[in-house]
Image: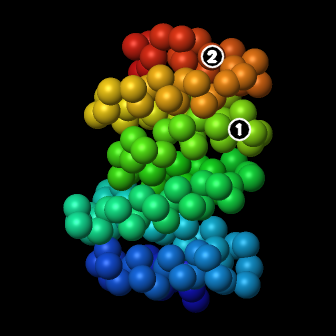
């Protein structure tokens, strides 16, 4: 029933108000993760109404806070999608740190590196912050390392 209710667009403010509470207090991991995925889909604004500029700060902080909790690829992916959708260049150092601490598929690592590179173009120094935070690169897949060294090879 909850998943059915998640499919509706209540607008960014109402969705955030209700679902951020579910994402942080629901009694089950599945409910919390479903709420994060739903908010992440709203942040990408492909299916739901876009997050207005004046609300983006709180949305970005919400996803940054969830990033510190991420220990699985699935949850990390939901959070990264939200951060990426909001083009949160201030989160790139946190994302870089998580690359080597969570077991991520090579393809996921590559997507994150390339997404981080695109986001980092908005602020001088953001790409370097991401690269440094992703150290030691030896924990990463060879393809991700290659993209960290030369992100212009990103698709």
Which residue lies at the image location 72% right of the left edge and 22% below the top edge?
136
Across and down, in percent, residue 122 comes to 29, 34
Residue pointed to by mark 2: 145
Residue pointed to by mark 1: 104
Outermost residue to the left: 53
Decide: is 148 above or below 39. Answer: above
- Residue 40 visible: no
Q: Is residue 66 left or right of residue 142?
A: left
Across and down, in percent, residue 141 comes to 70, 22
Q: Nearer the viewer, residue 127 or 114?
A: 127
Q: Nearer the viewer, residue 123 or 116?
A: 123
Which residue lies at the image location 72% right of the left edge and 33% below the top edge?
100
Q: Quadrant of the C terminus?
A: top left
Which residue lies at the image location 57% right of the left edge and 41% below the top edge?
95
Of the residues under marks 1 and 2, which one precedes in the sequence? 1
Quadrant in the picture for residue 47: bottom left
Across and down, in percent, residue 133 comes to 60, 31
Would you say the residues marked 1 and 2 are in contact, meaning their CB atoms lie under 8 Å apart?
A: no
Question: Which color scheme is applied?
Answer: rainbow
| Front position among marks 1 and 2 | 2
Q: Using a 10 Å C-alpha cutoff, classify the residue at mark 1 as few (fewer than 14 neighbours), some (14 to 19) or many (20 or more).
A: many
| Secondary structure category for the residue under label 1 | loop
Q: Quadrant of the N terminus?
A: bottom right
Cα separation between marks 1 and 2: 13 Å
Q: Is residue 95 left or right of residue 140?
A: left
Q: Nearer the viewer, residue 43 or 47?
A: 43
Across and down, in percent, residue 103 comes to 77, 39
Which residue lies at the image location 40% right of the left edge and 13% below the top edge?
152
Q: Using a 10 Å C-alpha cutoff, classify the residue at mark 2 as few (fewer than 14 neighbours), some (14 to 19) or many (20 or more).
A: some
């Amino acid at each position: 029933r909850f998943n059915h209710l998640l499919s509706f667009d209540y607008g960014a403010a109402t969705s955030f108000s209700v679902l951020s509470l579910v994402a942080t207090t629901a009694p089950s991991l599945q409910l919390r993760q479903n709420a994060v995925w739903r908010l992440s889909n709203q942040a990408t604004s492909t299916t739901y109404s876009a997050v207005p500029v004046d609300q983006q700060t709180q949305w970005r902080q919400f996803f940054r806070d969830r990033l510190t909790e991420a220990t699985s690829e699935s949850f990390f992916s939901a959070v990264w999608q939200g951060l990426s959708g909001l083009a949160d260049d201030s989160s790139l150092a946190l994302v870089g740190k998580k690359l080597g601490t969570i077991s991520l598929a090579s393809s996921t690592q590559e997507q994150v590196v390339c997404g981080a590179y695109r986001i980092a173009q908005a602020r001088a120094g953001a790409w370097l912050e991401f690269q440094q935070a992703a150290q030691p690169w030896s924990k990463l897949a060879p393809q991700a390392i290659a993209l960290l060294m030369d992100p212009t090879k990103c698709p």
